[in-house]
Image (cartoon, rainbow, N blue to C red):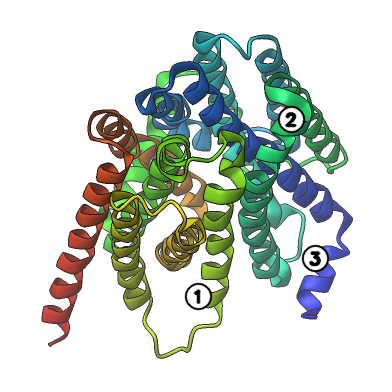
Amino acid sequence: MNRSIVRVLTNFNFRMLWLGQIISQISLNILSFVLAIEVYQLTMSNTAVSLMLLTFGLPAIIFGVMFGGIVDHFDKRSVLIFCNLSRAFILFFYFLFSAHIFMLYLLSVLISIFTQLFIPAEAPSIPQLVKKDDLLSANSLFTITFYLSTVIGSLTAGPLLRVFGSQNIFIIMTIFMLLASFFNYRLPRLSASKKVKFEFYIINFVKPVYEGFLFIHQHERIRQSLYLLTFSQALMATLVVLAPGFADKILLIDLKDISLVVMGPAAVGLILGAFLVGVKPNNILRGTIILSGIIISGITLIMLAVISFFNLHGMIYAMMFLLLVLGVANSFINVPSSTILQEETDENLRGRIYGVLTSLIGGFSLLPVLFSGILADVVGVGRTLFIIGIMVFLIGSYFGQKRIRIIY
């Protein structure tokens, strides 16, 4: 095993942050799938599921960049504990109001707001906990476990619903978030990187936003990476929106099996794709991988739609394989774009750039998420997959041709 990874794993402070990340991410991933199922069962509407996803996205637009600038002025350990305790409290309220659709929407907005505050306090704490030579290994572990927590959350959501029911499962998520708070509590003090006391004036909220967008405007590769990352996240958000209807109308399976049959293969594909990108030959350009990911995503969505058109319900394993391929293709877009973003971004602006990324994902994901939900209710899930697949394939083909003309 790499010595740097060993040093990171034996670093008590990093382990506390890392374990907190794993537990809290698992809880949030379970929550997203449980809410998608709950809302669909209460309304039988794909549009309602879209609106649920929007309640997570809207706070990202409003608070994503803003909180990135604010957190730098405070002890990050205190921010992490405060956010996780607040999210645990909100998860308990889900337990109390799980049958009330309006409350589900309201609580989702609240938990998203605290998550926007949490994001710029978590990963940016790593440099204060590990040596500079171990920073790459620490970030690699964080990335791997981010994907793993997606897989675990995807695979366990359905079984947990079966065992504990649609109400008690929120108690399990509350316990997970309290455990994450405990791990954060055991961290050392993570002093603010900016010694100037933060004052709640409008200029102190606007300035970080302006500086972040100015930097992005001046750096084309940063801008392209942000667009690609937003695109990849929008694709996965669209899959979450369509998952209940896809399982109900096309696969004809129990909604509690969505996590195993639909989201599980896609999440496994994310990890497999990240691994394949990591071991790629050096002569394969990142741009080639990204374009391949876009085109493969389009083709896969079209194939899923074709299977649904012919009512080939016995081909459930073929569909699961295609969902796995879709996850792989998404990593082909996501991982190289993330690497370019990290390499090209000024260290002093990294928090703000990631804040902009959070806002972009929340903002630009709104249209495809809402569009896919409404379209699925109007023309059906299969036709919606086909239309989205054609659009994605045409985008990939356009940029592929454009890139070839530049090379030759």
Say above or below: 343 vs 189: below
Mark 1 / mark 3, whichever is N-terminal:
3
- Residue 228 lies left or right of residue 392; in this view the side is right
User: Which corner quadrant holds the C terminus?
Assistant: bottom left
State the image coordinates of residue 42 (x, y, percent, origin top left): 50, 17
Disc ID at residue 8? 3
Mark 1 and mark 2 in contact? Answer it, CB < 8 Å: no
Q: CA distance from mark 1 to mark 3?
A: 23 Å
Three-letter amino acid code at the position of disc 1 = Val
- Residue 276 lies left or right of residue 148; in this view the side is left
Residue positioned 67% across, 23% down in the render = 166
- Front in this rendered view, residue 87 or 202: 87
Q: Determine the secondary structure under disc 1.
A: helix
The residue that label 1 is drawn on is: 277
Q: Residues within 10 Å of mark 3 (few under 14, many from 20)?
A: many
The residue that label 2 is drawn on is: 173
